[in-house]
Image (tube, rainbow, N blue to C red):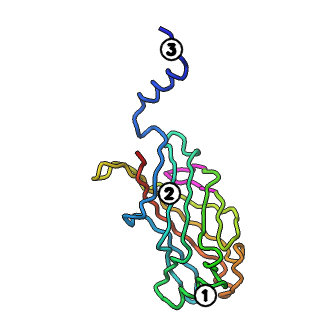
Amino acid sequence: MRITITRFLKICLLALPTSALAADYVIDTKGAHAFVQFHIKHLGYSWLVGRFNTFAGEFSYDEANPEAAKVSVTIDTASIDSNHAERDKHLRDDEFLNVEKYPQAKFVSTSYRELADGRGALQGDFTLNGVTRPITIEVSHIGSGDDPWGGYRRGFEGRTSFALADFGIKRSLGPASREVNLWLGVEGIRKK
């Protein structure tokens, strides 16, 4: 019996356990199992902490080939929430996020480099305030496994920082407040 290479590969892939295959995940924002938070020094005296309430994204991950990981996240910039309505209104105006002109921020990965102990460096293009620049997100794998509803989940956290001026935000909050820190938590539900 003759077997084609394509058929042979399909048989080999079917013999692999599911967890060994690359998988696509949707970030679980509906269940509130994900977040995009930020903090920046306020005038150098204290911290301003907040989050974006509305965002969506997907990622692909393969334990056997982590360098092939891909991530895409879109953030609704008007959903900024610093727990102070007047400040949020100011952050939405053209001195900061300019949400009328640029209603979305977006991150699209370009590469991933695995380091050690479930950590890695995720590089990609980040668009904010109409400016796109490369950034690196320090990533940690939290865990993965079956959930109680018959699905499979995988979670990561990431941290990065960048200068506001690099994204066209010229408003100065003082020399100690030039950079904003982002902390992201994503729990993905594997697509079927």
| Mark earlier in primary sequence (3, 2) | 3
- Asked if the residue under mark 3 is in contact with the one under mark 1, i.e. CB atoms within 8 Å, the reply is no
Q: Secondary structure at mark 1?
A: loop
Residues in magenta?
113-123
Task: Say if 42 sits above or below 188 in the image.
Answer: below
Left or right relative to 118: residue 192:
left
Q: Amino acid at mark 2?
A: Ser
Q: Secondary structure at mark 3?
A: loop
User: Which residue is the extreme one toward the top?
Assistant: 1
Q: Nearer the viewer, residue 117 or 106?
A: 106
As drawn, the label of residue 96 is none
Residue at image coords 53%, 84%: 48
Q: Which residue is mark 1?
A: 44
| Mark earlier in primary sequence (1, 2) | 1
The Cα atoms of the two marked residues, 1 and 3, are separated by 69 Å
Residue 117 drawn at (x, y percent): 49, 51
* Residue 176 visible to the viewer: no
Q: Nearer the viewer, mark 3 or mark 2?
A: 3
The Cα atoms of the two marked residues, 1 and 2, are separated by 29 Å
- Numbered disc total: 3
Task: Say if 46 sits above or below 150 in the image.
Answer: below
Task: Say if 157 sits above or below 42 in the image.
Answer: above
Residue at image coords 47%, 64%: 185
Left or right relative to 22: residue 125:
right
| Mark earlier in primary sequence (1, 3) | 3
* Residue 150 visible to the viewer: yes
Q: Nearer the viewer, residue 44 or 7?
A: 7
Q: Which residue is mark 3?
A: 3
Q: Amino acid at mark 1?
A: Gly
Q: Amino acid at mark 3?
A: Ile
The picture quadrant where one finds residue 15 is top left
Q: Which residue is mark 2?
A: 140
